Amino acid sequence: MNATNASPQYRQVADTLRRRIVNGEYRQGEVIPSAAELEKLFSVSNITIRKALAILSHEGWLAGQRGVGTIVRSAPPGRRMKIAVSGNFAEWVDTASGKSLPIEQKILEISHKPGPAAVSAILGAPPEAALWTMRRVRRVCGHVVSYHVNFGLPQVLDAIDERSMAGNRNFVDVMREDLGITLHRMDQIVEASVAERDLAALLDAGFGDPVFFVENVYTDAEGTVVAVTHLFLRGDRYAYQTSITLAAPGGPAGPPQ
C-alpha cells in the first residue's frame, strides 16, 4: 500500500475493493476475503481494514453475515452524471486508438469468465455466464497511456486472438474487418474517476491520480449489442475535445451553461 499518498490508507483499501466489486472480481452474494487475509493482501493494520469495510458497508456494497463473513451486496443505485460527447464516429476511433501515434499495445489476457453484472445485463447474458474478455494496455514511447477491457459473448467474439490485435490494430477495426460485423451505433459514457490500487499499477500511475473512465457499447445493424468496452485513460495523457453547434438567434436553445 502506498503509505506516502495523501489519501488515508483505509480510503485506498475501500476504493480498491469497490473497484473490484464493480469489475466483477468480487461478485454479488460472494464472501470477500477475511479481514486477516485483507491485512496481508494490502499490508495494513486490522483497524485500517475495518475502517475500509465500514465505508463500503455504509455505501451499501457489503454486508456482514454472522457465521459466514462479509457478503457482496447488489450495487447501490448509480449516482453519476452522464455527459454526451457527440461527433464523427470514424474520427473518434482514429483519435482514441492513436492511429497517428507510435502506439504499442500488450495483450494481458484473453479469457472466458464472468464479467461485471452491469456488462452482462447490457449483453443480455445471465450474471454468472462466462463472457469473452480481453484485457490490454497501450503505450506511447514506452509510457502507459491507457488500459482497455473488451467484453462480448464468446459465440460472437471468440475468433479474436492476439494475432488479430497485432501491431496497432484497434478493436473496432477487428470486429468490422475480421468478423464482418456491421456496426451501426456506439453509445458512450465518460466519467471522471481516480486510480485505485489495482488500476494505478496497470497504468503505472499513482494512487488517486485522475483517470477518464469510458464505457462504449457497440450495436450492430440489427440492434443487437455485440460488445462492451471499458477504457481507463490516464488523465495526464488524454483530453476530450468536441465541437457543438450553437443555435442561431431565435432558434432552439443551446447547450446548458
Image: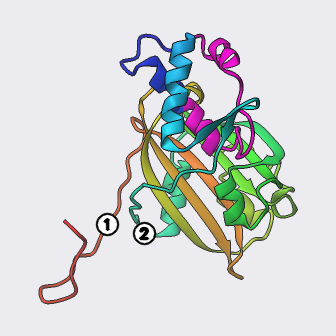
Q: Is residue 66 visible?
A: yes
Q: Which residue is mark 1?
A: 243
Q: Amino acid at mark 2?
A: Gly
Check the image and report above or below for 57 versus 188.
above
Q: Is 254 left or right of 118, judged from the image as shown?
A: left
Is residue 19 one of those drawn in magenta?
yes
Highlighted range, magenta: 16-43
Q: Residue furthest left?
A: 249
- Kindly check if marks 2 and 1 are in contact, taking CB atoms under 8 A apart as contact: yes
Relative horizontal placement of residue 248, taking residue 126 as reference (left or right): left
Q: Residue at x 48, y 21 (%)?
A: 10
Label 1: state its secondary structure: loop
Residue at the image position 55 percent from the left and 29 percent from the top = 53
Residue tagged by mark 2? Answer: 87
Q: From the top left corner, tell me how far across and down residue 248 is, in percent.
A: 17, 84
Q: Mark 2 or 1 closer to N-term?
A: 2
Mark 1 residue type: Ser
